[in-house]
Image (cartoon, rainbow, N blue to C red):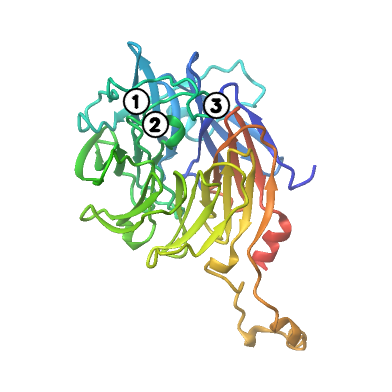
Amino acid sequence: MEDDAPVIYGLEFQARALTPQTAETDAIRFLVGTQSLKYDNQIHIIDFDDENNIINKNVLLHQAGEIWHISASPADKGVLATCYSKTADSRVVTCAAVWRMPAELEPGGHESPEDAASPAHALELLCHLDPVARGSTACREPDPVAVLTVPGGSCPEKNMQTWCVAASWEPKSQDGRQTWDSNVGRDAASQERGVAWEPAGDGKSVISLADNHILLWDLQESSSQAVLASSASLEGKGQLKFTTGRWSPHHNCTQVATANDTAVRGWDTRTMSQIYCIESAHGQLVRDLDFNPNKQYYLASCGDDCRVKFWDTRNVTEPVKTLEEHSHWVWNVRYNHSHDQLVLTGSSDSRVILSNMVSISSEPFGHLVDEDDLSDQEERRPEEKSQEPPHDSVVATYEEHEDSVYAVDWSSADPWLFASLSYDGRLVINRVPRALKYHILL
């Protein structure tokens, strides 16, 4: 079997929620959440055996509702958070909640993908993040004037409007990857809903976005209680609502970036005040954000204008770089945790694109080698010293999906491996091409 061949895993239900298990740095593990209206939803724990190129899995029942976003605690392998929606009395009820896996699953006992007879385990609810009840266990109901189903709406897969409250958390990994989205009163097609953790810490600080509010929570009593610490509001003309956000891994984790409509804003979590604003970051809705893990002022954004843009938050008048490789909405952008020149994007054009953005990376000229360390033979080749720095390029386009790709993410254990998830429930695990891997390392 070829080492670079993709490995494909199919879920029974539709899905759009994917995250690596951030606290797990030894095993390659992803969590996938399903979206089913008729049946109990599930969280699949996917372990990838890199040596044998096979997938092992466990299944957890998520009976609360359809999962829009999922995030794993970086401090506790057994804790995760979901943003989900459900129907109650012909109304949509939306919740963000913190859960614990069964203790027997935390070390990672597995079954094969073909073993469908094994019983699924249930999650233990730790607490809800409720912007109305300020930490009570009640879920939030959307405004009664909101309509659930909109015929001919903009959602490509189900023409549905759904609302969700999302949360951002505190992880201690270096990926700095946070997402939260609040969609109370906004349609599902124009919002990302998610849960994310702060890039450094013990997983006890949570930020959620609800409508036009940023809420900072403290998780107490082993995450069984969420206490509101502070909050801020997005003010302006019209009904402004957050769509997505990221917690920066830099500046002692005191900065957050959010998106609403076509704008991107930066916030200081100590004062809950705005520190920068990119008014028209994209021509259409901004779908996702991610911070460069190695360059403290660099931020990537993507949106419905089919573009991926890279920004220096010290000067936001123009993007540093723009990519236009996708032909439909770009739902996700992800920096590699270790090698920030590697950038993943996933789109409704059913493609995943891996780009090598070396010119704006932390190593734009490759590895800098001290001349004293060069051998005599190496010193005799001056033509190599005058080589131009490498150029930005598309490394590979992955076309294993047949539906909209709603999530892409890097493994927290292996920097050369990543997963992508399309709405039809197809999870694909791929690797960075070996030629590029060795070029970066050597």
Q: Estimate the spatial distance between the alpha carbons at disc 2 and disc 3, rounded to whole Å.
A: 19 Å
According to the picture, the residue beneath numbered tag 3 turns out to be 157
Give SS at disc 3: loop
- Between discs 2 and 3, the one toward the N terminus: 2
According to the picture, the residue beneath numbered tag 1 turns out to be 94
Image coordinates for residue 147, horizontal then vertical, percent: 36, 20
- Between discs 2 and 1, the one toward the N terminus: 2
Image coordinates for residue 160, horizontal then vertical, percent: 46, 23
**Label 3, residues with CA under 10 Å away: few <14, some 14-19, many ≥20:** few
* Quadrant position of residue 79: top left
**Label 1, residues with CA under 10 Å away: few <14, some 14-19, many ≥20:** many
Q: Estimate the spatial distance between the alpha carbons at disc 2 and disc 1, rounded to whole Å.
A: 8 Å
Image coordinates for residue 99, horizontal then vertical, percent: 37, 30
Foreground: disc 2 or disc 1: 1
Residues at badges 2 and 3 in contact (C-beta under 8 Å)? no
Q: Observer-nearest residue: 145 or 352?
A: 145
Residues at badges 2 and 1 in contact (C-beta under 8 Å)? yes
Three-letter amino acid code at the position of disc 1: Thr
322 above or below 100? below
